[in-house]
Image (spheres, helix red, strand yellow):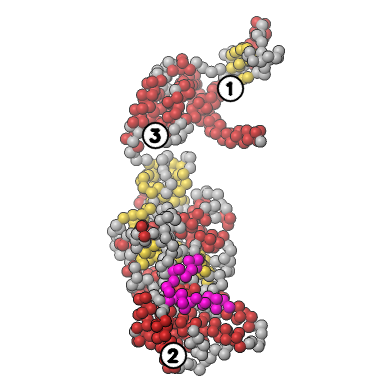
Amino acid sequence: MLFAAGKHDSDRSRPIAAVHRTYARALFDAAKENGRLAEVHNELSDFAAAVRDVPELRTVLRNPELDQQTKAGIVADLLGEADQLVRNFLRLAAEKGRIGEIEEIAREFDRLLAAEERRLDVELTTAYDLSDESSNTRRSLARDHAAPESTLVLTKAVSLGCGRVRPLAWCSRPRNSTALLEGPLMKLRPEEITSILKERIEHYDVETDLAEVGTVLQVGDGIARAYGLENCVAMEMLELEHGVVGLAFNLEEDDVGAALFGEWQHVKEGEPVKRTGKVASVPVGEALLGRVVDPLGNPLDGGGPIEASEERQLEFKAPGVVARQPVKEPLQTGIKAIDAMTNIGRGQRELIIGDRQTGKTTIGLDTILNQKDTDVMCIYVAIGQKASTVAQVYELFRDEGAMEYTTIVSAAAQEAAPIKWMAPFAGCAMGEYFLYKGQHALVIYDDLSKHADAYRQLSLLLRRPPGREAFPGDVFYLHSRLLERACKLSDENRGGSLTALPIVETQAGDVAAYIPTNVISITDGQIYLESDLFFSGVRPAINVGISVSRVGSSAQTKAMKKVAGRLRLDLSQYRELEAFAQFGSELDETTRKALARGERMVALLNQPQYQPWPMEDQVAALYAGVNGYLDEIPVADVSRFAEELIEHLRAEGTILKTISESGDLSDDVSAKLDEELKKVQQSFAPSESDSLVS
């Protein structure tokens, strides 16, 4: 094990040694071209010896807390009138963070110079004193194999008790460090070096207030590489020419990989790029309600500039467990099947998943429409959708009066990958403005499949290593850190909530694919829409078997709990019996009744798009279904019966109002509801068509 560990350490140190050789070779070649090898060697060796012999200097140059510019300034002060080539080299090494390794670089320079001069410095340690003849023989041998300037140092080691010569140790003979500090380069005593270091550190904060400007090395596909931004931080916003904004993604040793926002096609190689010192942020506030914006907060609806009250960071750490409280308040979607069986609470993350064209977006839009006259602010994030589709959504919201409390964030299909990557984070930041003010917000991410595709494209362009399905390794973290920001804050933190409804598209119903399983494991439940149900006329086409809300009935009103308690189980049994009934012609009476009840409940839960139902209307309709008032109603007339029931109860006035205000279905209200249901049942005129199962 010791041998293996030593080999591993040696292998790990090889890349570092290669860097030292590269720096030494560059200085050596420059000095050789200028004919100043000896001068450069002496001054480099003097500086390396000073670093070795003055602990304060060595500590400062190897301190990771000091930035490279400060170290470069210290080096410049120490060198004074040194050779220009050496000064330039040491300043470059300081700016690149290699000045702390100058001793290793100097040793590599020594080796290069020794090879150039065919000089060999040898130290030979023996166990006994050599005679003059033996010493002269060994010195002659060294001169024959190397330059005349080569040296041979003979020493005796008392601890070597054997009568044989110890194997040769070939090394460069160390220079006198005391003489180095008194040489032409380092005419400063250690205490003077300490004084310079103290002065530089005292003025450290003053010298960091400098603009840092780099140069664009490469640009294409919405990605740029910039050189010269040594102190750039992750997710920092950069300024480029033509009003283009960059976002620092890859912080590499020699350059910065940045995603570009705006008309990046006009950016050319060689143009300047400037640090802003500001982490990526977007405008937020009430001023964005009623507007259509891009992820940067720029208006897209032609409604004039937006005067935002403040900005929030694009990436923000999600609240911890202590800062939260359990999800317990319902967020009504207005969709009977969801509010009854897979209910959503304020602060929850509920995934909407299914194949394309199965009604996923409709659920999100219905939920936003149902927040009218509530205290929930809505953000709809359209990722990779056609601009015409987003325009239709805007017109729908405007006609229904929903734009008063809604912001649409659009990253259209024709936009570059960085814009699509940014969109959900921008929408989340806009929702967090209301969350931390103690208000309530809802964010629809439509959809995260296109978001993952955009992030894959962005990562590949940045040359990040691909993983499964060519997605980068952190694609799970991409969505987890986004969705974790949805929560219900504790009362001590003002009790706000941010509800997230991400949408994910599947291929041929494959919920076990990479991105779907990722998001399923992150969220608090999923609503699965099935193509077969959709094409059979079920709207919304929810598969009750695998759709679930992990919050459970804690986010339901008492009235909804009472009427929807057995609904999920009854519908699941109906689907199983329906499949079984296809293989048998004769069914017993109990099975026929279960099929008839299930068929009518499916018809009752059917709902046209963009027509959300209030909670009290849903409770009344479901009460009629689960208590058998629909058993004698033909399946084709169930929807009409439910509509007439609601019209009758609205005319009656008290029942729906009581349920709405109390959120409960008391025995007295149930008795009144039974009476009204019998009246509607008697007055209802069924059509001629009847159920296939009687």
| Marks 3 and 2, the one that precedes in the sequence | 3
Q: Given this view, does label 2 or label 1 mark the residue nearer the observer? A: 2
Closer mark to the observer between disc 3 and disc 1: 3
Examine the residues drawn in magenta and state their main secondary structure. helix
Residue at left offset 66%, top offset 36%: 1
Q: Amino acid at mark 2?
A: Lys
The image shows residue 249, relative to residue 665, as above or below, that is above
Assess whether mark 1 and mark 3 are in contact (beta carbons under 8 angstroms).
no
- Say whether marks 2 and 1 touch (CB < 8 Å): no
Tag 1 residue: 115
Residue 303 at least partly seen: yes
Distance from disc 3 to disc 2, alpha carbons, whole Å, reads 85 Å
Pointer 1 local density, CA inside 10 Å: few below 14, some 14–19, many at least 20: few
Q: Which residue is mark 3?
A: 69
Type of residue at label 1?
Answer: Ala
Q: Secondary structure at mark 2?
A: helix
Kind of element beneath mark 1? helix
Q: Is residue 500 visible?
A: no
Residues drawn in magenta: 549-573
Q: Which residue is mark 2?
A: 678
